[in-house]
Amino acid sequence: MKENRSFEKNAMEATIRIAVVAALVIWTYQIIRPFLVPLIWGVIIAIAVEPFVTRVSHALGNRRKLVSVLFALVVIVTLVVPVVLFSTSSFQALQPYIKNIHKVHLTIPPPPNNIDGWPILGPVAAKLWGLATENLSTLVKQFEPQLKSTALYLIGLVGGGIKAVFLFVVSIIIASALLANAQKASIATRRIMCRFSGEKGPEIMALATATIRAVMLGVVGVAIIQSVLSAIGMMIMGVPFKGLWAVLVLVCAVIQLPTILILGPVAGWAFITKDTASAVIFLIWCMMVSASDSFLKPLLMGRGVRIPMLVILLGALGGLMVSGIIGLFLGAVIVAISYELFMAWVEETDRDICSLR
């Protein structure tokens, strides 16, 4: 009887403790959930730029906190100022059109003479453009449902963009705090990994760090290269709003969309406004820029990591499809760690088999 009562008492106490811990975990998750994505991004950014911050802090007399704060300020200013300037200039540019709409005096210039010669879309574009020039109200009524849905979609994009900028600023602040206390954060992370993984904790931590830096270099590095190359081509061709197109190329490259989606229409503009030879050369340049990631990504993504590049690439692309842009990094890290653990298990099995022989 005493043993049964003791067992029931221990079971009841264990149940209560588990319930309390579970409640705390759930409650904590609910509290930090709005900041979970910025926190993950902050960790990824801190890991990616830590070598650069370390070199700069050594050059400035080991003033790591100062360098971390300067890093956050430079990135935030670089991000926020162009967004504000672009929003202001866009609003000012739309003011005349808004006034014309209220006055019903909005006019559309006639289509260019060679519009019929455009491949595939030429006849359709000529018809719609001509109708807009002759009777804009009829065209608006004809496509009113599509225009409304497009307007709502664009408003949603603007709202999502503002939210994304805010979350990115929070991520940069978190990354700055982690960079300022990199040694303490590294020790705490190593202890956590050792708690979960035992002796393999430091090895898994080093693998995750190298994988994140490799993916950052292979994704963001390639995107910057493509954006710069496209900007050079557009500067030579005299493309208007070249800065905006270069930013859109950068965004497309980061989210793993072909940059020809942006450069294609720009090349089409070149065929309308420039001579044929220059337009053809520019189109070839755009195609080369768009295709450059096929060899730059494998070259940069596999640096510093002993995991096969194909494994990292599959993890990054699979993570992108499952979890969006943040999955690029998380997917690559998870697949790389899984691959490393699997290969360690295989090697251990091989040693056991060989010892039996």
Image (cartoon, rainbow, N blue to C red):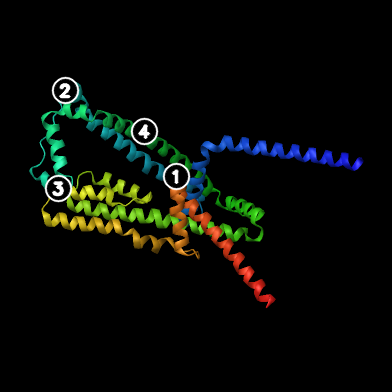
Is any part of residue 249 visible from this angle? Answer: yes
In the displayed orientation, state which residue is furthest to the bottom. Answer: 357
Which amino acid type is marked by label 1? Ala
Q: CA distance from mark 1 to mark 2?
A: 47 Å
Q: For the point 56% across and 48% down, which residue is it?
A: 181
Residue under numbered circle 2: 104
Question: Is there a contact, CB below 8 Å, between mark 3 and mark 1?
Answer: no
| Nearer the observer, 128 or 76 | 128
Asked if 317 appears above or below 72 in the picture, the reply is below
Earlier residue among tags 4 and 3: 3
Earlier residue among tags 4 and 1: 1
Look at discs 4 and 3 and give the one toward the viewer: 3
Q: Position of residue 164 (x, y in %)?
A: 41, 39
Along the horizontal axis of the image, is 287 left or right of 224? left
**Could you say which disc has been placed on residue 9 in the image?**
none
Q: CA distance from mark 4 to mark 1?
A: 28 Å
Residue under numbered circle 1: 72
